[in-house]
Amino acid sequence: MHLVSFLYPALLAASGADALRSDKVKLSNIQSLTLRKGLQTSARRVDPIPQLKCVGGSARGLYEPEVMRCKNSGSDYDENSIQWTCTASLPEEFKLGSTDVICEGYDYPEDPYILKGSCGVEYRLILTDRGREKYGKGGGWSGDDDDRPDGPRTTGEKIAGVLFWMLFGGVVLWMIYSALRNRAQGPDG
């Protein structure tokens, strides 16, 4: 009996110490994340990803922030749908567009528990007016495709746009041609 009473607290202490070292963290309990350029996420079920990855925007490839900090801003409709507010120190020519925090679910993709250190951010980097002046991108007649709130146009959208304008131009030219031809023939016909 004395052996059991001695082993029971020792087993509890050992299991408690193991829980403290656990790499399983509830996503809704994370208050903030600090992500760094050039570092990879932790990985258990899937391959590691870069902690910071620029996925678009008019300034993509022109600058990369060294550090980005994302704060838990609460949840949408349940505690697993966390909204994050991300900030980075950027030169005045750039601003952050949309940001998406991506974390590896511990046991399955939508697990409310994640692997500690597995979060990364996919972000869009946008040129400010000052950046457009300096780098000469965007603005102009066609606008800057990457500054659209819904992201850059797909190849299909671009082709459809070109076909529309070609058809429109053809109709206008046909109307002008018809008007000039009718005018040249005069009222007699």
Image (tube, grey):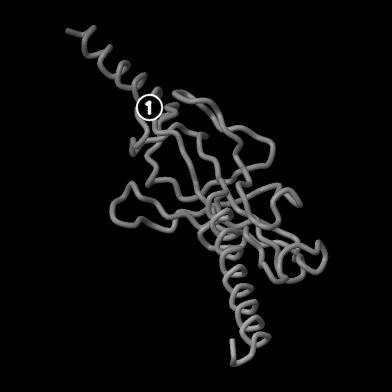
* Mark 1 nearby-residue class (10 Å; few <14, some 14–19, many ≥20): few
| Residue furthest bottom as drawn | 187
Q: Nearer the viewer, residue 173 or 179?
A: 179
Question: What residue appears at the point 35 percent right and 29 percent down from the top-left corner?
Answer: 108
Q: Nearer the viewer, residue 143 or 134?
A: 143
Question: Does residue 156 appear left or right of residue 57 in this picture?
Answer: left
Number of numbered labels in the structure image: 1
Give how far across and how far down residue 187 sits, in percent. Answer: 59, 92
Q: Which residue is mark 1?
A: 19
Quarter of the figure that contains the N terminus: top left
Pick out the residue farthest to the right.
Answer: 134
Task: Give residue 125's quadrant in the image.
Answer: bottom right
Placement of 52 over or under 71, stated as above or below = above
| Circle 1: element type | helix
Q: Is residue 15 left or right of residue 160?
A: left
The part of the image, by quadrant, that contains residue 136 is: bottom right
* Above or below, comparing residue 77 to residue 117 in the picture: below
Position in image of residue 145 (x %, y %): 62, 60
**Identity of the residue drawn at 51% across and 39% down:** 119
Q: Report the front residue among 179 and 103.
A: 179
Residue 73 or residue 21, whichever sits in front: 73
Whole-percent x, y for residue 78 in the image: 28, 52
Q: Position of residue 80 (x, y in %)?
A: 33, 46
For the point 55% across and 63% down, the residue is 164
Q: Is residue 71 left or right of residue 165?
A: left
Quadrant for the C terminus, please. bottom right
Amino acid type of the residue that numbered disc 1 sits on in the rendered structure: Ala
Query: Where on the picture, by quarter, is residue 23?
Result: top left
Q: Residue at x 76, y 52 (%)?
A: 62
